[in-house]
Amino acid sequence: MSSMSRDGCIDYRDALIMKRLSEFSYVLLVTGGKGGVGKSTIASTAALILSQSSNRTGLLDLDLNGPSACLLLGVDESPMEAEDGLIPPSVGGVKVMSVDLFAKGRPLPLTGGAKEEVVKEMMALTSFGRLDYLVVDTPPGTGDELLTITRLTKQVGGAIVVTTSSPLSISVARRVIEILGSMNYRIIGVVENMSRGEDDSLSRRLAAEAGVESLGAIPFDAEIMVGGGKKGPEKLLSTVFARSLREKLRKAGLKVV
Ligand SMILES: Nc1ncnc2c1ncn2[C@@H]1O[C@H](COP(=O)(O)OP(=O)(O)OP(=O)(O)O)[C@@H](O)[C@H]1O
Ligand SMILES: [Mg+2]
């Protein structure tokens, strides 16, 4: 099946993307709308946890303007070119694909339609192979990256919506939930991140009003901010943050030991 691209031509990447998608058992979208709420940290750590639980796992970093996965996980190898596409480098058993593997810290001034093109290129060209989980990190906002990936992965995907307890973050998360809902995208649950132990009633109320599950709160954990990717996957996995996230993933029904 091929669709029309923006210039009115048939887009032959669609068939390749469908083939890639058929190799993934589940696509876990980590989103939330508001910037800086912990989407990338949660996506990267969730990928490590899933891999540690014997799942074949990939991480697709779709933050094209501010990619974080490579820095968070300490990945600096380049993808390998093979007949079947680009083989992503692995860390902690997770195959990582990000524009930063090519941009190497330089900015990518992409806008609008160009972003949709890059998302489709990444989906078409990356040879993740068979995966139990493809975790997708999304940028802040509800722009082209989020809309393109939700459209592509609707049949095999579920989203975790990340927010903090701040009313501002909650209001943006509500809009994200509405957009995902209007696209019939499955929402696994809402996670409140960086909780300081106060009551999590705002995120719970958001989940209840939207008719989705509340997965609870992940505590603020100063440990994860120290050292970034240089700490390595083991250090990241041993944090209070990771222990709490593991529990949320289990609650969401993901295969986590
Ligand atoms: N539970 C937590 N406790 C303490 N710090 C945290 C926690 N979760 C995330 N952080 C920190 O918050 C900052 C923002 O996290 P992160 O980059 O993952 O957010 P983001 O939602 O992906 O941001 P952006 O919208 O810019 O992509 C980072 O410095 C990260 O280390
Ligand atoms: Mg991010």
Image (cartoon, grey):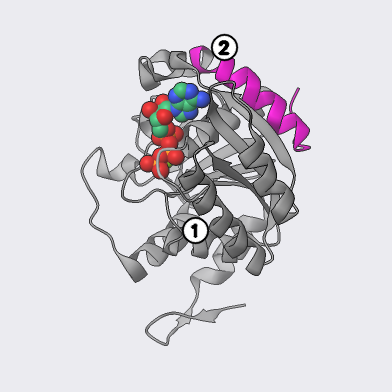
Which element is circle 1 on? Answer: helix
In the picture, measured across the screen, residue 93 lies left or right of residue 98, that is: right
* Quadrant of the image containing the N terminus: bottom right
Give the extent of the magenta segment. Answer: 235-257
Which element is circle 2 on? Answer: loop
Q: Answer whether residue 128 is magenta in the image.
A: no
In the picture, measured across the screen, residue 230 lies left or right of residue 163, that is: left
* Location of mark 2 (residue): 238
Q: Amino acid at mark 2?
A: Ser
- Image x and y of residue 81, in percent: 40, 46
Q: Residue at 46% of width from left, 63% of height from top? A: 120
For label 1, count other residues whose C-alpha is less than 10 Å away and answer few (under 14), some (14-19) or many (20+): many
Q: CA distance from mark 2 to mark 1?
A: 30 Å
* Location of mark 1 (residue): 146
Which quadrant of the picture is home to ligand 1?
A: top left
* Quadrant of the image containing the C terminus: top right
Q: Nearer the viewer, residue 95 or 199?
A: 199
Q: Residue at 43% of width from left, 55% of height from top? A: 141
Pick whichever of labels 2 and 1 is earlier in the sequence. Answer: 1
